[in-house]
Image (cartoon, coloured by chain):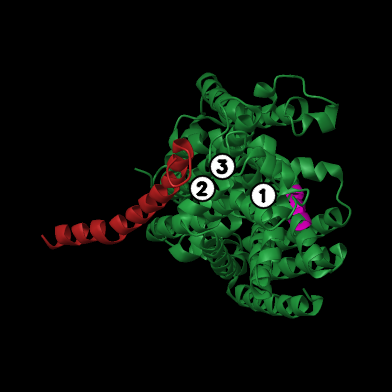
Chain colours: A green, B red
Amino acid sequence: MEAASFIVFMALFAAVYIILGYIGYRKTKTAEDYFVAGRKMGGLVIAFSYGATFISAVALIGFSGIASIYGHGILWLAFLNIFVGIFIAFVFYGFRTRKMGLSLNALTMPELIGKRFNSTRLQGMSAGIIAVFMVAYTTAVFLAIASLIGVSFGIPYETCVIIFTVIVGIYLVVGGLYAVMWAHTLQGVLMVVGMIVLTVAIYGMLGGVAPAHEAAASLTASDLAGIGSPAATQAPNGLTSFPPFLSKPFMMLLTLIFGVGIGVLAQPQLVVRYLTAKDERALRLAVPYGGIFILLMTFTAFCIGPLCNVFMVDNGLTYPGSPDKVLPMVVSELFPQWFVFLFLFAVLAAAMSTASALFHTAGACVGRDIYDKAIKKGVSGEKSVKVTRYATVGIVIATLILSLRPPDVVAFMCAFFFGLMGGTFLAVYTLTLYWKKMSRAGAWAGILGGFLFTILWYVLVYFKTAPSIIGSSMFSSYKINMLDPLFIAIPLSFLLAYAVSKVFKQDSEEKRITEKAFENIG
Amino acid sequence: MILGMDPFVFTAWLGCILATILCVVYGVYHEYIKERKKKEKEEE
């Protein structure tokens, strides 16, 4: 594909974003405008922004590639993405987060926790954890997309990284969350169109749902070994069946399904979307829109992943060496040029939407939560926005430098971002919203306990990370070292938050703030 | 095999569709049915 056509489309893309950035800039007058889009967003924009932030390029091409190896069993993750990631998230977390955010005038997730427990230190510490790991995660998102575009269009990797970072950085820093959320809506539409066309075309080529799945099920281990696919050993019961109980592929799927499926509830870049809702009706409307959006993203991506093997066997293609390259290879080999273009821009939209949300959240953590609240103990709204804009520019530059010369640690930090956020914040965030008697000491214990346990598990035990960090896992049994830390970190964090709150109870000021926090919650 | 998938995988496949229907029903119920009931109550 010609680099010239890519540059033309990229210029159009950039022009649209910069216009959105300018409109966002004109609308941004207060800190509330910059951080939570003035709390004026409607249901459709919230749903698309939440979905486009949630679903990155990793989810579309990375997880469809993983599905091509482990089979359709990963559809349980798509189920959790819709049921937990949308329904439970909005119904049980969204409304309370918005109400408490309004009562306490909180504009970020660390600020919500910090104000609920009357502790700017807790706010600063939470923000520090988020910002550090978010930069690494954003770097990994850029790495994936720049490699894909570089391979597809023959554009040097460094040029791709610089173009993406500059475009996202400009519209985000100038336009704040208004620009980010409007851009998400456009990006979401592109992602929906791309995935619908891709799914319909793939099932159409294979004769419909049942014939396509039967064709995948009929592939034998020797067929898959013939194309060099790891599915030959990783899908021992076939591509449309779940692996044997407690086998290695079973443990791998278990980790992926629960690590990402449950961890989604405590992602700071998603939680802030609840705070942008103009009213409760907007959040209620976001539930159906969001459910349909995620169905069209993860359900379709995970369904077509295993079917790629059928195309590879039928067309004599060999496994490209990495799961990330399976779907792009099948698309570029079997589809017309116009669709390859549409698909790549859909993936690009997924990457840019996630990256812009991560930049905004990390910038807000450094500018508002750490500098403004934890260090300066509160500055004016206008200055808070100015500081956050500088902080966001700093985050963008740091990400650019890391992306151009990515150290190995970036890959590890990205691998455990979702799990780390879940393990660190889910218990305390849940109790913040639901338990009036949780104390500041309990919140500290829950967050620190969950964070330290998750980090130690990744460094010492987890099979993907421990061997690269300390040489080998402390536990040789794969039933332990393949277990996601969330399974232990979340209950441990709940236990610590509860037990410490029972011993070190709320003081009178905390009790007063708790009453204020729950004043709008029935 | 159901639609070419084993029953456990088919449950997940169906679960995705049912979860989406749940989200849509939730939205429709609150937007139309609950609002209509509320208005009727107010009129009474």
Amino acid on which disc 2 is placed: Glu
Element class at badge 2: helix
**Residue A181 at what x, y percent from top left?**
57, 65
Residue A167 sits above or below residue B2 on the image? below
Disc 3 from disc 1: Cα separation: 11 Å
Question: Which residue, given by chain and number where applicable, does mark 2 sit on?
Answer: A214
Give the image quarter of residue A26.
bottom right
* Rendered-image quadrant of the C terminus of chain A: top left
Element class at badge 1: helix
Label located before the other in sequence (3 or 1)? 1
Element class at badge 3: helix
Question: Which residue, given by chain and number where applicable, does mark 1 sit on?
Answer: A65
Q: Tell me if I can see residue A279 in this picture.
A: yes
Disc 2 from disc 1: Cα separation: 19 Å
Label located before the other in sequence (3 or 2)? 3
Amino acid on which disc 1 is placed: Gly
**Residue A504 at what x, y percent from top left?**
55, 22
Residue lying furthest left: B44
